[in-house]
Amino acid sequence: MANYLSFNTKDIYVHINKYEKYSFDYLGWTVSDNYKYNEKIPRHSQYSITITSPVITNQEELNNSNVRGKEIADIITLLIPISGLSPLNSPKFISFSNNHEFVDFKSAPNGWSTNYSDIQSTLDSEKGDELVLTVTAEGLIHSSKLDRSPLYEIQQMLEHYDDADEHTAFLLFLYNSIETANDINVYMLIGKALEIVFAIGIYNKKRHIKSYFPELSEILKDVTFGTLFDLTNRRKESSVVS
């Protein structure tokens, strides 16, 4: 029996209008996708990506494949938000873009544990024959909508990833960090990303954002990139307290 090492993303919520299963070869690995359509709630349809190694015959090949597979997975993780999907590690209980926050009473701060569940179980047991209703917090649903499998775009970006300059690669890292941030440090990350964008001359600070992105006209009106840059560096969440 042949052995193949595989890495699978968690399910990502997305509604794909015209999905067709797709796969491609990358450095001897097979990158493929899978889509489970939800007829009742299309935006809760689930999408995942799998990367599969060449055949493995010994321990050394297994170890080498594990290292290579993680490297490929890390790059795909950076490219997933650029393809139109929600990031793999979106904050579960907070969304800065929509100003939504969800409270999970059972969870503890990062690096801490809590006996909340133990006390809740004790309190429930003291209720005797009373009906006990248990509610489990699943967190926020981050969903998107696409016309076709995002794996087409991911393939193009993956195959040219090594050709990207240092600034572009770092911007990809920053973008993923912004999308997965779960505290107000997100504003400093946005400010740093804009700083790099302006430094390499992609956009003109004096031009209106709508001249580059007409779809944002109603929201940003006559705001320039320079104004946006100033805002990110002067608001209390991103400024250095003197």
Image (cartoon, rainbow, N blue to C red):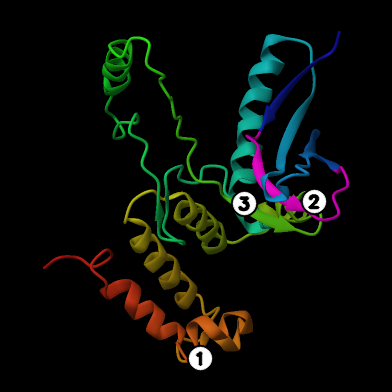
Q: For mark 1, what is the residue?
A: 207
| Prevailing SS of the magenta stretch | loop
Q: Is residue 164 magenta?
A: no
Q: For mark 3, what is the residue?
A: 143
How far apart, in angstroms, are the residues tagged by discs 1 and 3?
A: 32 Å
Residue sitting at 47 percent across and 40 percent down? 139
Looking at marks 1 and 2 on the same chain, the residue that comes earlier in the sequence is marked by: 2
Viewer-nearest residue: 121 or 158:
121
Asked which quadrant contains residue 226, the reply is: bottom left
Where does the image place residue 76, in percent across and percent down from the top left? 65, 44
Looking at marks 3 and 2 on the same chain, the residue that comes earlier in the sequence is marked by: 3
Q: Residue furthest left?
A: 242
- Circle 1 packing at 10 Å, graded few (<14), some (14-19), many (20+), is some
Q: For mark 2, what is the residue?
A: 149
Where does the image place residue 220, in percent across and percent down from the top left? 48, 83
Q: Nearer the viewer, mark 1 or mark 2?
A: 2
- Helix, strand or loop under label 2: loop
97 with respect to 55 (left or right): left
Q: Which residues are magenta?
A: 9-22
What's under tag 1, amino acid-wise?
Answer: Arg
Looking at marks 1 and 3 on the same chain, the residue that comes earlier in the sequence is marked by: 3
How far apart, in angstroms, are the residues tagged by discs 1 and 2?
A: 34 Å
Q: Is residue 53 above or below residue 56?
A: below
- Circle 3 packing at 10 Å, graded few (<14), some (14-19), many (20+), is some
Residue sitting at 45 percent across and 83 percent down? 225
- Helix, strand or loop under label 1: loop
